[in-house]
């Protein structure tokens, strides 16, 4: 590569080789979370390795030494050739996607100690990432999507800030959903305040525009509605998921 040192050229070569099958982690916080939750991080680069270490010392001293050992410093112009959009922290990494088999084993194991969130035919990748962050924060078993969109799409992973590695995230067809009673959020459902979600529940959410699919609606154990002010069309998907998970957590201690 013209104008690029031998060391930088080697980094670019190795990155491009790993990127074809790797999960891109944009920014310090995505790398931090991935390391915390056991991701196999193949490569990590930073435009200022010392600044990345300072962030780790300040915000995540539990992973500071591992981050320090992983990070290779590269010039800003090299980072911009490696990623579609450089993160303000100047950090990027590549990790191995968890195997579908491992995620399915987690999702299908019974009894469960926390629900599975089901996003039925989601359309917005940012919403998927936001829901993964909620799921990780509430400690749910996993997030399953139906439909064509891969929940591990780079934009969804970016929105999830590395927390895809903190819970089981997979795409499945409706007939292949994990076992358990399905509580589907629907405007025609019973008021959520009168419903108790068991730990083995599947909490299903449709898109903001179309709601849950007829196929999933037919399989639902119960339809549940979140009270909403008249003439307001809908809550944001991630907001609805957050309210439902808080409702589950508040009833289970």
Image (spheres, grey):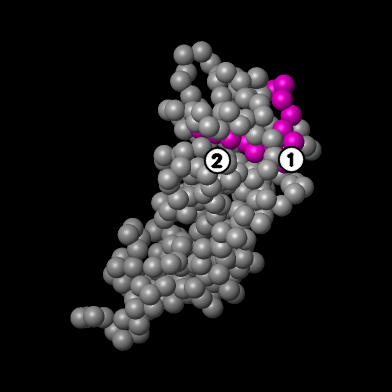
Badge number at residue 174: 2
In this rendering, position of residue 90 left or right of residue 60: left
Instruction: Identify which residue, 149 or 165, lies in the foreground.
Output: 149
Q: For the view shown, which residue lies furthest in the left direction?
A: 2
**Is residue 8 at all visible to an observer of this figure?**
no
Circle 2 SS class: helix
Give the quarter of the image for residue 193: top right
* Residue placed under numbered mark 1 in the picture: 199
In magenta, the rendered stretch is 193-206
- Is residue 203 in the magenta section? yes
Asked if 116 appears above or below 56 in the picture, the reply is above
Label 2 to label 1, Cα distance in Å? Answer: 20 Å
User: Local crowd at mark 2 within 10 Å, few (<14), some, or many (≥20)?
Assistant: some
Label 2 or label 1, whichever comes before in sequence order: 2
Give the quarter of the image for residue 178: top right
Q: Position of residue 235 (x, y in %)?
A: 50, 27
User: Looking at the figure, which quarter contains the C terminus?
Assistant: top right
User: Local crowd at mark 1 within 10 Å, few (<14), some, or many (≥20)?
Assistant: some
Circle 1 SS class: loop
Instruction: Determine the residue positioned at 57% across, 41% down.
Output: 175
**Tag 2–tag 1 contact (CB < 8 Å):** no
């Amino acid at each position: 590569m013209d104008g690029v040192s031998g060391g930088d050229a080697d980094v670019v070569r190795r990155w491009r080789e790993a990127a074809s099958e790797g999960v891109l982690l944009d920014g310090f916080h995505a790398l931090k979370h991935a390391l915390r939750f056991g991701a196999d991080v193949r490569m990590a680069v930073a435009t200022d390795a010392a600044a990345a270490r300072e962030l780790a010392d300040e915000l995540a001293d539990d992973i500071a030494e591992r981050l320090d050992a992983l990070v290779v410093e590269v010039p800003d112009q090299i980072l911009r050739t490696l990623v579609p959009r450089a993160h303000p922290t100047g950090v990027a990494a590549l990790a191995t996607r968890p195997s579908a088999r491992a995620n399915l084993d987690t999702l299908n194991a019974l009894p469960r100690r926390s629900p599975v969130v089901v996003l039925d035919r989601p359309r917005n990748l940012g919403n998927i990432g936001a829901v993964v962050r909620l799921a990780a924060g509430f400690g749910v078993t996993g997030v399953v999507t139906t439909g064509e969109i891969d929940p591990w799409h780079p934009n969804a992973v970016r929105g999830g800030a590395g927390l895809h590695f903190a819970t089981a995230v997979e795409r499945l067809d409706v007939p292949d959903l994990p076992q358990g009673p399905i509580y589907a959020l629907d405007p025609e459902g019973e008021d959520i305040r009168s419903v108790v979600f068991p730990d083995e529940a599947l909490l299903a959410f449709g898109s903001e525009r179309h709601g849950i699919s007829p196929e999933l609606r037919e399989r639902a154990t119960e339809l549940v509605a979140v009270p909403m002010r008249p003439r307001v069309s809908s809550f944001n998907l991630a907001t609805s998921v957050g309210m439902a998970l808080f409702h589950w957590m508040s009833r289970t201690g």
